[in-house]
Image: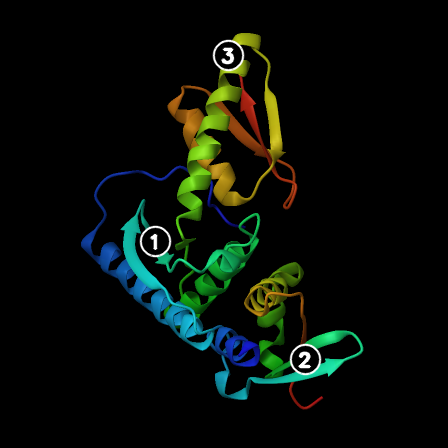
Amino acid sequence: MEKTEKLEKPGKLEKSEISRLEEEGDLAADYLEVLLDIADLPGDIDIDVENGRAALAIEGGELAHLIGEEGEVLEALQELTRMAVQQNTGDRSRLMLDIEGFRDKKKSALRVLAQERAEEVKSTGESITLAPMNAFERKVIHDTIGELGLASESEGEEPNRCVVILPAS
Amino acid sequence: MIDEALEHLIKGIVDNPTEVAVAEKNGRRGLTYEVRVHPEDIGKVIGRNGRTAKALRTVASALARRPIRVDLLEADE
């Protein structure tokens, strides 16, 4: 099972870990760059290391169809890219892919949602179950709730896994 | 272009990339891509609960800008 929801410890990464993540980023960028070439789509790929993961961001201006209405194409492409990296390195990859800033925008909207619902839980003292979300979305919610001093957990099975915001005990 | 894109996406995730072949078929059920991989790789391209097969179809349909079928088969069938 994926452990994408566990909280990451911020702080300094070992040098060897950084170079491993940079290698992941390079392999992922190669895989994606050839795909863009084949599809004749313009796109610049930015490679970074963020929160202990390789992070790739593609900007091209004409890539909305590679995101999909709900980000489903982006998720699919990220999954395939992780597999391609793993095929090369032999290690499971947790790289994050973004296209045209979709995840950044989504993240802001989810943070607002988490804050609003957390206020509700604080004032009523009762837990709230949110709508089903994917792993990325749940992680944003868990992180925001944690920052607000409340606890949250995930319930149910994919694709109906939901975050439950718990009142302070 | 879709056949080439699928070939690239799949070659990157299998143990036997030289044995990946993609054929385009336009039949009654619309545009279909028949993908053949080495028998050892079939599990990989289908994935747990068909997750990888679904990802391939999602990306290929996005590139084609319309829904397409992707059939995954073992080579030498």
User: Between B48 and A131, which is closer to the camera in this rendering?
Assistant: A131
Does A12 sit left or right of B33 as displayed?
Answer: left
> What numbered label is drawn on residue A55?
1
User: Is B55 situated left or right of A63 in this image?
Assistant: right
Q: Are marks 3 and 1 on the same chain?
A: yes
The residue sitting at 28% across, 38% down in the picture is A10
Exactly how many numbered labels are in the figure?
Answer: 3
Position of residue A146 relative to residue A47, above or below, is above
Q: Residue at x 56, y 34 (%)?
A: A154
Residue A122 is tagged as 3
Residue A12 spot, x, y in % from top left = 21, 43
Label 2 chain ID: B
Q: CA distance from mark 1 to mark 2?
A: 33 Å
Give the colouring mode of the picture. rainbow
CB-based contact (under 8 Å), mark 1 and mark 2: no
Question: Who is closer to the viewer here, B39 or A146?
Answer: A146
The type of residue carrying mark 3 is Lys
State which chain disc 3 sits on. Answer: A
Farthest front residue?
A: A61
Q: Is residue A140 above or below residue B76?
A: above
* Type of amino acid under label 2: Leu
Mark 1, chain letter?
Answer: A
Q: Determine which quarter of the picture holds residue B19.
A: bottom right
Residue to which mark 2 is pinned: B73
Residue A129 location, x and y as percent? 61, 26
* Badge 3 vs badge 1, beta-carbon distance below 8 Å: no
The picture quadrant where one finds residue A164 is top right
